[in-house]
Amino acid sequence: MSEQNTEEEADPSNEEMVIQTDVSESVEESAPRGETGTVIRSEGINVYYNDDQALSDISLEIPENRVTAMIGPSGCGKSTFLRCINRMNDLVDAARVEGDLYLRGKNVYDDDVDPVALRRRVGMVFQKPNPFPKSIYDNVAYGLEIQDKEGDYDDIVEESLRRAALWGEVKDQLDESGLDLSGGQQQRLCIARAIAPDPEVILMDEPASALDPIATSKIENLISDLAKEYTVVIVTHNMQQAARISDKTAVFLTGGELAEFGDTKGIFEDPESKRVEEYITGKFG
Amino acid sequence: MATEGQTEILESFGQVNKTAGRLFQYLLQTATAFGIIVLAFLLLFVTNDAIQPLTADPGWHLTFFLTLVVPTLAVGTYVYRRNRDALVFGVMVVGLLVVSLMFSGGAALVLIDIVQPDTWAGISLAFLVPAGLVVGLQRYSRQLPFLVRFGTAVVLFYASLLGVPGPLGALVGVSQVLPNTVDIAPSLLSGVPEWLLVVGFLGVPIALGVGAYFRSVHGTEAGRSAAGVAVLATVAGGLLGPLVGVDPLPATTIAAVAVGPTGAYAVGGGISDPDVREGLLVAGALVGGALVGALAVETVGFVGPQAWVDYQFLTSAHSRNAIDAGLYPAIGGSILLMVTVAVLSFPVGVGAAVYLEEYAPENRFKRFVDVNISNLAGVPSVVYGLLGLGVFVTYLGQPTGTVAIGGATLGLLILPIVIISSREAIRSVPNEQRQASYGMGATKWQTVRNVVLPNAFPGILTGTILALGRAIGETAPLIMIGAPSVVFSLPTEFTAKASAMPLQVFAWASLFASEEFYTQAVPAGVVVLVAVLLAMNSVAIVLRNRYQRD
């Protein structure tokens, strides 16, 4: 799969990746796949920034090897929820998290959980591409080095770059700085960096929002491929994107509440709540 | 207002009064110009006294005008018209040559009179051997627990630097079994000529640094060639020096510090970027013109200016006669003081900055420290001198005026500046970088070591060099701790008394105040001091510009 993918990516003439904008059509295309086990389960998560409540009582279950999308208007807390999963909120002094969140049955907010160890199982890709000012090779190998991973780093770096559909473009310039790449390439480098240590879950916080449409569609194809082996949770403010690539969708609405959670097809075609329907059809948000 | 579908044509848009703003702008310009002009005038005045260009033959001026000024201007204009970057590159090459020649002079001074090459080799080996062992240990036994590796590293460095059982053994009365590497090295290396030691322990490290720089800019291949060129230049310096009448030791040092890096920069830059290659013409015109001019003047017999800054001034000690007086021991003292200051204030200052930026919790104590570091940076230097006198001399009972005490006092003086500029550099590392590292499952220590410090390092280095520039010009603290104004020999250890350049100039202007000293030694001393300061600051400025652009 990766070989083919590389060929595709390496070929600059291959620009026919159509950016689908029609919601219903794309939902039709993504054939419903069978149910899989739950990887992440949250129960009554509340998050406060000082005295302001950012999330209220979020409970949901994220299935394995599927893409789960979080959508909602700005400031609805979808990114905050994402950062609860790998406890990145711990780094914000003002943030306080209440409730339980289980990763493979273990509550990550238990006292005996080391957030650093947790983050080694949960990779993260950020909104703005943020490669380190190191060589492309060192960027991808960063996680391997800090986690003291065993194995041949050259092979792992190549494999990760192939999976991130970047190998064909950078294989001759692994020594060069990751910052010399274009924005879309940088984001795929960040994805390669995140998957190199082989995490169980990949969190993506609006990974394509800073990119142009072509780079965006490359990232979207990549996410669908990644879901074959990883559990992907993606935050996006782009509803078409959520409809195109996700299996499950969670709709957050202003005030930090989870308005609806279910199969993507169901959410977009037949939302239960009036407010979600209004949001999806663009009446507000 | 448009009438009948026809767009009205305006006569004018009117005027807005800008008098106040313009006046304000002129005032600002005047203030800026005033400061610059006063300073430039002072420097010009002092330089004129020190160099005395008007005492030269008119023929001397004419010769250099024809060989140096005219060709350089012509070539410079030609290159500038074609490609501005090329001119910048050419000027950079010459600037690097001048600055690195000054540094190489300092290095040669140290190697000839302060630290003998075999001692220097011993010190280098004492660090290199355990460092190599530790790196090997890291690579081949990742599974060893951290404390074991750390303990081994400490023991290795201790044994290498201090011997077995070392000062700890002396405390409990055990005599030394194995001497330390610094003591062993000279006997091991006794057969090797001094200049080869300089090649090995000064030329090679510098060449490796040059190679690393070129690898980061132009790739692995360029890095290797640059390092090779630098090493070859150093060896060539040692072999060719005696042929032109320079001792092998200073020749090698100058080649290692100045010729090698400049050559690598010129050749490497010219090869990798053909656009700027023409800049080398400018460098060639400047250097070649100066050499041809000097040769011509010598052949014809024109007398040059009676400059007070000359070889004699730079290489002799103070004398009763202004004409024989020199700055040599003070230059050596300043170099040793700066090394001490850097060694003491850099780790402490950077450590404090990292703690305050990355680790310290936001609370009242941190705010208190924040405010007081800024206050400490503004405390007059004479107060720091008093502090040094009180703590080191009176309380700890150290002898007055030694290199160690002077360095420690000046180190305290610039510590707040180092902390503030390092914090600034650390704060300017984008937060996204830290987030990315934490998101990968890095600990705080791994993030600081792998992401924050490498990114902040150029800024930290720039700030430290500028702070050292302040320390090198300080007189008051040195007077307070009783540093001697006049020293006739170089200090050879940290417990020796040392003078410093500003102190020597101050002594000439006060203790030995006479017409002769005022008009000869003082201006010469000031020019040397300012030149050293500018050389240091130019390194900082180049570093800053280079990393701001990236």
Image: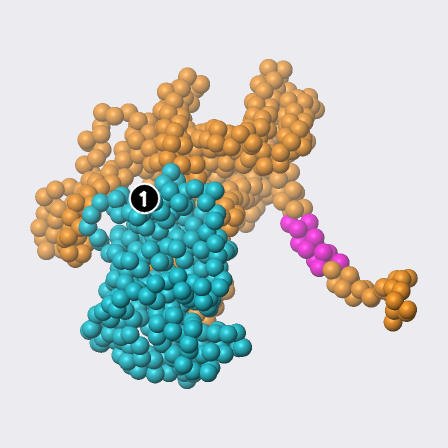
Chain colours: A cyan, B orange
Name which residue lies at 22% across and 45% down.
A152
Q: Nearer the viewer, residue B103 or B432?
A: B432
Name which residue lies at 58% across and 42% down.
B523
Q: Nearer the viewer, residue B236 or B489?
A: B236
What residue is disc 1 on?
A3
Name which residue lies at 66% across and 28% down.
B78
Residue B251 shows in the view: yes
Residue B251 occupies which quadrant of the picture?
top left
Q: Position of residue B346 (x, y in %)?
A: 37, 54
Q: Nearer the viewer, residue B328 or B516?
A: B328
Residue B282 vs A63, above or below: the answer is above
Residue A244 lies left or right of residue B15; in this view the side is left
Residue B146 occupies which quadrant of the picture?
bottom left
Q: Position of residue B189 (x, y in %)?
A: 22, 29
Residue B426 vs B329, above or below: the answer is below
Name which residue lies at 12% across and 42% down.
B178
Q: Nearer the viewer, residue A201 or A273?
A: A273
Which segment is the magenta one?
B26-39
Is residue B36 on the magenta stretch?
A: yes
Q: Amino acid at mark 1?
A: Glu
Q: Position of residue A157 (x, y in %)?
A: 29, 47
